[in-house]
Image (cartoon, helix red, strand yellow):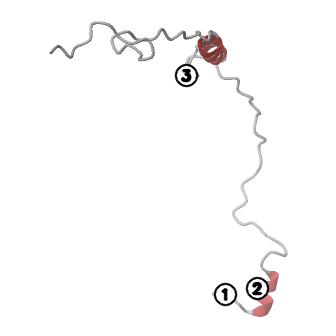
């Protein structure tokens, strides 16, 4: 007795044939990722160019330094100085050495 069937009944799905799944590509997601990536790269390049433009290429030791010169006045030497009012209270209170 032969129990194998050579044909598949119409109401039973075939296991060997896979149903065709139609997937619709969504171009919006990869497009948004690509645009975001390009925006980030452009922003980074802009920041690098702006930072490089503000860097001084000449070192400070190579450039001339402007100096203001004032001639000193000639005075006589004073060996002692009098600071009026700064220690008067200390002397009156007899505080200190």
Q: Is residue 83 left or right of residue 43?
A: right
The earlier-in-sequence mark between 1 and 2 is 2
Residue 67 image offset from top left, x and y in percent: 70, 27
Residue 36 image offset from top left, x and y in percent: 64, 16
**Along the line of sight, the residue nearer the viewer: 73 or 52:** 52
Q: Nearer the viewer, mark 1 or mark 3?
A: 3
Q: Is residue 70 visible?
A: yes
The earlier-in-sequence mark between 2 and 3 is 3
Q: Which residue is mark 1?
A: 96
Q: Which residue is mark 3?
A: 61
Residue shown at 67% from the left, 15% from the top: 50
Q: Secondary structure at mark 1?
A: loop
Residue 49 image offset from top left, x and y in percent: 63, 12
**Along the line of sight, the residue nearer the viewer: 12 or 54:** 12
Quadrant location of residue 27?
top right
Quadrant location of residue 86?
bottom right
- Residue contact between numbered discs 1 and 2, judged by CB atoms under 8 Å: yes
Q: Decide: few, some or many residues near mark 2? Use Cα within 10 Å; few <14, some 14-19, many ≥20.
A: few
Mark 2 and mark 3: span between their CA atoms? 50 Å
- Residue contact between numbered discs 1 and 3, judged by CB atoms under 8 Å: no
Q: Which residue is mark 2?
A: 90
Quadrant location of residue 2?
top left
Mark 1 and mark 3: span between their CA atoms? 50 Å
């Amino acid at each position: 007795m032969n129990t194998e069937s050579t044909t598949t009944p119409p109401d039973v799905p075939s296991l060997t044939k896979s149903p065709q799944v139609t997937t619709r590509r969504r171009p919006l997601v990869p497009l948004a990722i690509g645009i975001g990536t390009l925006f980030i790269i452009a922003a980074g390049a802009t920041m690098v160019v702006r930072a490089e433009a503000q860097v001084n290429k000449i070192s400070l030791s190579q450039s001339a330094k402007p100096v203001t010169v004032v001639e000193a006045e000639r005075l006589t030497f004073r060996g002692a100085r009098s600071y009026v009012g700064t220690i008067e209270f200390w002397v009156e209170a007899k505080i200190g050495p």
